Amino acid sequence: MPKQKTHKATKKVLNVRNSGSVTYKKSNGNHKTAKDSSKQIRQRRKAGVLNESNVKRLKGVI
């Protein structure tokens, strides 16, 4: 059976850490943030981490 190709759009969004966890950039943090509290804007700067069930599901396409 041939190897599965990498899904390029997914590869551009998700990052795999050395520990095996998968991170992504949180949305809605670039512009039009005046309506949001400082806490919301600050929390969006941190990378989001996928939970284990989604990591197992997406490992094959990354």
Image: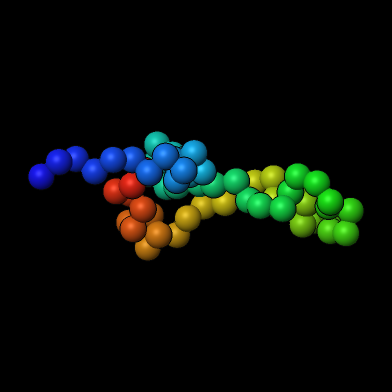
Question: Residue 55 location, x and y as percent?
Answer: 38, 54
Task: From the viewer's perspective, tell me whether residue 47 is left or right of residue 1.
Answer: right
The figure's colour scheme reads rainbow
Q: Residue furthest left?
A: 1
* 58 horizontally vs 12: left or right: left
Give the camera-side residue of 53 and 9: 9
User: Residue 3 occupies which quadrant of the picture?
Assistant: top left
Please count the marks in the image: 0
Residue farthest toward the bottom in the current orientation of the protein: 53
Quadrant position of the N terminus in the picture: top left
Q: Residue at x 84, y 58 (%)?
A: 36
Rendered position, 21 above or below 39: above
Q: Is residue 56 above or below residue 16?
A: below
* Residue 52 visible in the current orientation: no
Q: Would residue 23 be visible to someone looking at this image?
A: yes
Residue 49 coordinates in the image, percent (x, y): 51, 52
Residue drawn at (72%, 53%) of the image: 28
- Residue 38 x/y as whole percent: 84, 53
In the image: residue 31, left or right of residue 59: right
Q: Which residue is at 33% across, 58% downward?
A: 57
Please state if 15 lies on the left or on the right of 57 as rendered: right
- At a point 49% along the width and 39% down the height, the residue shown is 12
In the rendered image, the quadrant that contains the C terminus is: top left
